[in-house]
Image (spheres, rainbow, N blue to C red):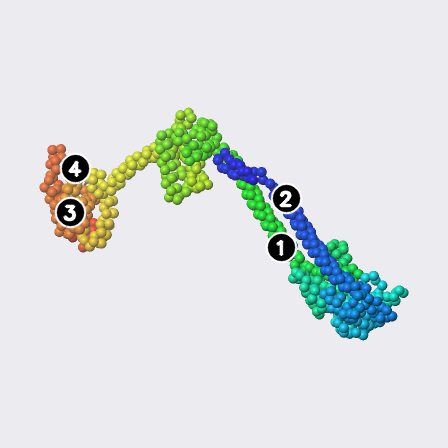
Amino acid sequence: MINESKVASKEGIQVTLPQNRIPLLKVLSSLAAIFTLLGIWLVFELRNGYDQVLKQANYRAAQRSQILGQSLRTQILASDYVLRDVASRIEIIDGVFVDTALNRDKTLSTLLKEKGDTVPNFFSMVLFDRDCKFIATASGQNIGTRSKPELCEARKKFKGSGPMVVYVPGNKSASGRAALVISRHFSDVKGQFLGGVLGVIELEQMQRWFDSLDIAAYDSVSLVDNSQLLLARKPAMPFYFEKQMMTEADMNSLSDKYAKSGIATTIDIDGLERLFGIYKIEDVPFAIVYGFEKLAILKQWRKRAIELSIGYCILLLLAGFVVRSHITVLRQHNEISKNNALLRSSEANFRMLAENMADIVWQINSFFKVKYTNAADERVRGYFNSEVIGIDIREQFTELGQEIFQREIDKRLQLEKSGNKGLAMNFELPMRCKDGREMWVEISSVPIYGEDGEIEGYQGVARDISLRRLHEEKLIQANQEMENRLLEATEEKTELQELALHDAMTGLYNRRFLDAAIVREITLSEREKRPLAVIMLDLDHFKNVNDQFGHSAGDLVLKALADIMRQTSRESDLICRYGGEEFIAIIPNMSASQAFERAEIWRRQLEENSLNYGGNEIKITLSAGIAIYPDHGKSGEELILCADEMLYKSKRSGRNRVSIA
Ligand SMILES: Nc1nc2c(ncn2[C@@H]2O[C@H](COP(=O)(O)OP(=O)(O)OP(=O)(O)O)[C@@H](O)[C@H]2O)c(=O)[nH]1
């Protein structure tokens, strides 16, 4: 099991690392060793099992062939017993075969039949003489028939103590059918061959016996003679009967193989590979060959081999998974280690950077408890790091600072709720210093998110802005002063402007204004298709007033006329002092008659109202000339010129009158 531990950084960053890791190489080499051993064991086990199965099959085949061979031998011995019994009853007297037993009246044929019937396998019993001529048969037939000369010769030469057993092919058989012939021979005192008695087991009969044997499908059992001729077989293959089943060399090699390893396989005549057990029947020139089909024998072994291989593969896969998961764990660990190294390096960099910064670098948790401050806090506010770690940051603010902080936190939470996550926020608030001073700081803050995406703290920078604020205040003050001065200057300027456009003494517009205004008024009148009246006034014999009463009295007269003109004017009328004792009124939307009337009013009022100056009554009149736009001129110059001409006309005509063009 892998234990885990948490590595926590000072800033609260936690990284999980698996402990007691087994190195990959160790795991791989252990697994490789286990699986190699398991593989070797599996191969050995399967190979051994394979050999054992084949050995056992060979052994069982040998056993079966032995049992069947013994069974056949027993049948032959039983037949031999009957032959010996018959032979014991026969006496050859002067070359004549005589039954020496009690039942002398019986013929030899009857004797042979009776005795032959006691052995079910015997097809026939025959008594033959020294020339192998049949002198009596159980069936009574074929008397006088002779065995083939070579067979007869073989009988004569046979010196064995047991019966002579031979295979006689069909073409050499007296019956014309292939058979096993068992015979016992007579001889005289000198050992001369005198004939004998024989029993015949036809191969067909032998085949029937083979057919009756209970053997498994794909097994085979064969009877072969000492020349490997196939005499009987199950499953029967008549085509191969009496043909060589295998060469003697093959048979010997099979025997050799069996002797060496206990396993001997070869391809049978039906094309199937079989494990053979061969039993050569004692004293009889036949052998029983029993075969188990190899594939059938190996069926169980194959099943076990497949099961074991699947098991092995499953284990291999499991091991693969174990290795893979181990690799994944190692990779994760490497990744975490790398990240931790990066983190440590970045932390170290951050620390170095933070500790050397002039500004206060801080970090608080979601409950506003201080988790970190750099050395600048001591330099700036006088607090040691240990004095502020763990305390509520809000305690470090003045009351106003706490209000501002709360407002900013609320604003932050609103922003977060509306999806604006992680924004940097800047605000200013007053903090407390250790010596009791109040210090304004500019705070720049960003949130720190936990793995669940929720805010788990804040971090940022606080900069002492006391000096800046002082400068700002001074600047504001300076600005205020500047603004005041500017205001004053503006007022002065307005006054000056006013002065520039007005006549200082009368307060009427001056000529400068008139020159600009008349152009504007003509444009307006032209656009609105209305008349514009230009009335020019001049005091009559004004020089006399100055001369008679003084300049101040003249000024008084000028002011008096200005008042008259102003009082009887509309807001839109432009009344100007044109120069000296000349006045011009520009009156929009005024016809010639109206202008005349207006000028008359001014003339009359001046004439009728004498002025009192220092107890002296000053009486004065005026002359006027009128020009109307557009009838008397299209431009300001033309109109003024025209009005001036009319004025002089009035002067020439005796003064104190109004003339119109
Ligand atoms: N008191 C005073 N006198 C001024 C002012 N401007 C001009 N005058 C005087 O106005 C007089 C103008 O005299 P004139 O041009 O001879 O004209 P007039 O005496 O009015 O004679 P007519 O115009 O021909 O009727 C001069 O004596 C100027 O000194 C001013 O601002 N104040």
| Residue 448 picture quarter | top left
Q: Which disc, if any, is residue 30?
A: 2
Q: Is residue 470 left or right of residue 133?
A: left
| Mark pair 3, 4: CA separation | 20 Å
Q: Residue at x 62, y 50 (%)?
A: 312
Mark 3 neighbour density, 10 Å: few (under 14) some (14–19) many (20 or more): many
Whether tag 2 and tag 1 are in contact, CB under 8 A, the answer is: no
Q: Residue at x 63, y 42 (%)?
A: 26
Secondary structure under badge 3? strand
| Mark pair 4, 1: CA separation | 145 Å
- The N terminus lies in quadrant: top right
Which residue position is annotated with label 1?
Answer: 303
| Mark pair 2, 3: CA separation | 131 Å
Whether tag 3 and tag 4 are in contact, CB under 8 A, the answer is: no
Whether tag 4 and tag 1 are in contact, CB under 8 A, the answer is: no
What amino acid is at disc 4? Leu
Of the image marks 2 and 3, the number of the one nearer the N terminus: 2
Whether tag 2 and tag 3 are in contact, CB under 8 A, the answer is: no
Q: Which numbered mark, 4 or 2, is in the foreground of this view? A: 2
Secondary structure under badge 4? helix
Which residue position is annotated with label 4?
Answer: 556
Of the image marks 1 and 3, the number of the one nearer the N terminus: 1
Q: Which disc, if any, is residue 624?
A: 3
Near-viewer residue (387 or 658): 387
Q: Position of residue 370 (x, y in %)?
A: 44, 32
Whether tag 1 and tag 3 are in contact, CB under 8 A, the answer is: no
| Residue 61 picture quarter | bottom right
Query: Height in image: 608 above or below 181?
Result: above
Of the image marks 4 and 2, the number of the one nearer the N terminus: 2
Give the number of marks: 4
